[in-house]
Amino acid sequence: MKGYYGVYGGQFVAETLIHALDELEEAFAKFKRDKSAKGELDDLLKNYAGRPTPLYYAKNLSRYLGCDVYLKREDLLHSGAHKLNNTLGQAILTKFMEKRRIIAETGAGQHGVATATAAALLGIECIVYMGKIDAERQRPNLLRMKLLGADVRIVEKGSMTLKSAINEALRDWVKNVQATHYILGSVVGPHPFPEIVAYFQSIIGREAKRQILKQAGKLPDCVIACVGGGSNAIGIFKGFLKDNVELIGVEAGGESLELGKHSATLAMGRPGILHGSLSYLLQDDCGQVAKVHSISAGLDYPGIGPEHSYLKDTGRVKYGVCFDSEALDGFKILSKLEGIIPALESAHAVGYVLKKRDYFKGKMIVINVSGRGDKDLGIIESMEENGV
Ligand SMILES: *Cc1c(COP(=O)(O)O)cnc(C)c1O
């Protein structure tokens, strides 16, 4: 069925949004066939954003682990993470639909910054919803968005974090749908968003496959990526789904796998509906969406994209967990051995490989470094002070 991955996905939204989603689906189908829109995107990805990002053979880390490690360097993409692949694509799609206003939600501020960046570049009005607690925690990103010309609206309702920011953005969309496109930040939400975001992020996997074949002369044994909503992981996995390559998604185990202390949706959740689609979801005994925790704000989401739920059930992708302290190990090792300070999100993928080093011994692996770690230095500092 349209918009489903197995039983997951769908469009669980208010009637008023069905029309907007249909319109988006139609426009996206046209966009994919439009040479000039695609040409504009390719040009900006190359000359503005810095694609292709390097695939780097990490010699020191390889020697340390006893396996061959290649790093896909999304941390080198403009604005510091893979998120710009999606926001540039969707901003061009906005123009293609002849809409003049973009809205977005943001948790840590990374997706807000990437959306504000694309909107500034293309001269489109941009409104970003951000929970009050997040705005206080992530002041530098708040300032960045304002500098980029975005109208940042602080949400003081509900959890005052990402979940309530998404709810406010959806409310705005219902009211202003005619002139407005909602740029969702990950492979989540109602159809066709998971498909659109995966399409724009799949460039990571296409490049990685071409690069590894050129550099190593063969496909890797294994590709590893961290999973929040799941967009950087889907992006790199798409390049290898049909190959005999093991794919591993790493979720944030937080402090422990006790309810409320992690955000390991696939490991600990069960199917439920959040933000317009059916997918694995962290819920308490009464079916309420659970409180989640991770040191990395980008992984701090109780849901996950529907395609990941499907890939888990079919067994094509394996999903593992990396705890806060293990992610911190990954963060430090990559910084010290390779001179690359990764985002705490990406450090979960590295930390997972460190803890399972016996499993990876002698193999050739690709780790997706989804972003750079400058944004996380304050968190690292306070963790050190607290002796984690
Ligand atoms: C937002 C973010 C993530 C998590 O989002 P996905 O959709 O799961 O990729 C991971 N890494 C970085 C650097 C991020 O900014």
Image (cartoon, helix red, strand yellow):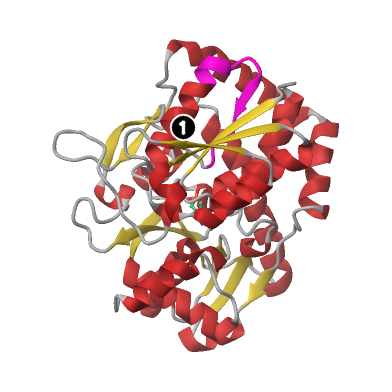
Instruction: Reply yes or no: does residue 214 show up in magenta.
Output: no
Left or right relative to 56: residue 384: left
**Mark 1 neighbour class, 10 Å CA radius: few under 14, some 14 to 19, many 20 or more:** many
Residue drawn at x 23%, y 51% is 260
Instruction: Reply yes or no: does residue 175 show up in magenta.
Output: yes
**Horizontal and vertical percent for residue 46?**
80, 53
**Horizontal and vertical percent for residue 143?**
59, 51
Residue situated in front as seen by the camera: 210 or 280? 280
Residue drawn at x 50%, y 16% is 17
Q: Quadrant of the C terminus?
A: bottom left
In the rendered view, would you say 277 is above or below 22? below
**Horizontal and vertical percent for residue 203?**
67, 50
State how many labels appear.
Answer: 1
In the rendered view, would you say 314 is above or below 255? above
The residue wearing badge 1 is 189
In the rendered view, would you say 212 is above or below 52? below
Looking at the rendering, the stretch of residues picked out in magenta corresponds to 173-185
Question: Is disc 1's CB within 8 Å of ligand 1?
Answer: no
Left or right relative to 135: residue 71: right
Res 354 seen here:
yes
Residue drawn at x 42%, y 15% is 14
Left or right relative to 165: residue 217: right
**Horizontal and vertical percent for residue 71?**
60, 70
Quadrant for residue 118, please give it: top right
